């Protein structure tokens, strides 16, 4: 059987181990293709959603991080959030780009062997 190199790793928010203060919402499931996590903090930050994934040593390397997010109130960005990979905070502030649902590039991360 042929083997192929890994091209990407998809981590869906609804599969997170711990939603923290976020809730699973399916309002835009038809547009998104699946439910997503939503922070209903009413102006107050909620507890972080977290998850852990295992990546085989052979698949370790440099990956671009893409996050699908929505700016709920363009110009005000009440739903902005950050992503942390292996204790590294990505520079992009997600959900603060004055756009509807879209994929935002968060930068690259190295997953060492």
Image: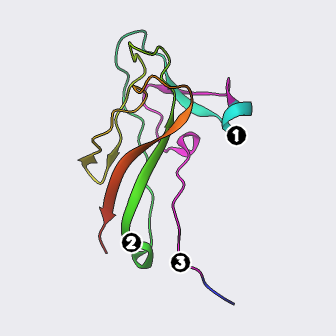
Give the label on residue 5, or none.
Answer: 3
Q: Residues within 10 Å of mark 1 (few under 14, many from 20)?
A: few
- Mark 1 highlights which residue? 33
Above/below status of 90 relative to 100: below
Q: Which residues are magenta?
A: 4-28
Residue at position x 43%, y 79% in the image: 58
Disc 2 is placed on an element classified as loop
Return the disc, 2 or 3, that comes first in the chain's sequence: 3
The quadrant in which the C terminus is found is bottom left
Disc 3 is placed on an element classified as loop
Q: CA distance from mark 2 to mark 3?
A: 11 Å
Q: CA distance from mark 1 to mark 2?
A: 28 Å
Q: Quadrant of residue 34?
A: top right
- Mark 2 highlights which residue? 60
Instruction: State left or right for residue 86 relative to residue 78.
Output: left
Q: Position of residue 71 (x, y in %)?
A: 47, 23
Return the disc, 3 or 1, that comes first in the chain's sequence: 3
Above/below status of 23 relative to 42: below
Please state which of residues 109 and 53 is positioned toward the viewer in this rendering.
109
Residue at position x 70%, y 40% in the image: 33
């Amino acid at each position: 059987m042929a083997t192929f190199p890994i091209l990407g790793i998809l981590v869906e928010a609804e599969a997170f181990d711990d939603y923290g203060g976020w809730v699973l919402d399916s309002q835009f499931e038809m547009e998104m293709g699946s439910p997503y996590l939503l922070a209903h903090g009413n102006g107050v930050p909620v507890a972080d959603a977290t998850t852990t994934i295992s990546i085989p040593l052979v698949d370790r390397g440099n990956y671009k991080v893409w996050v699908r997010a929505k700016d709920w109130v363009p110009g005000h960005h009440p739903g902005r959030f950050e992503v942390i990979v292996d204790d590294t905070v990505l520079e992009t502030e997600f959900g603060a780009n004055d756009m509807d649902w879209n994929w935002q590039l968060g930068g690259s991360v190295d997953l060492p062997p």
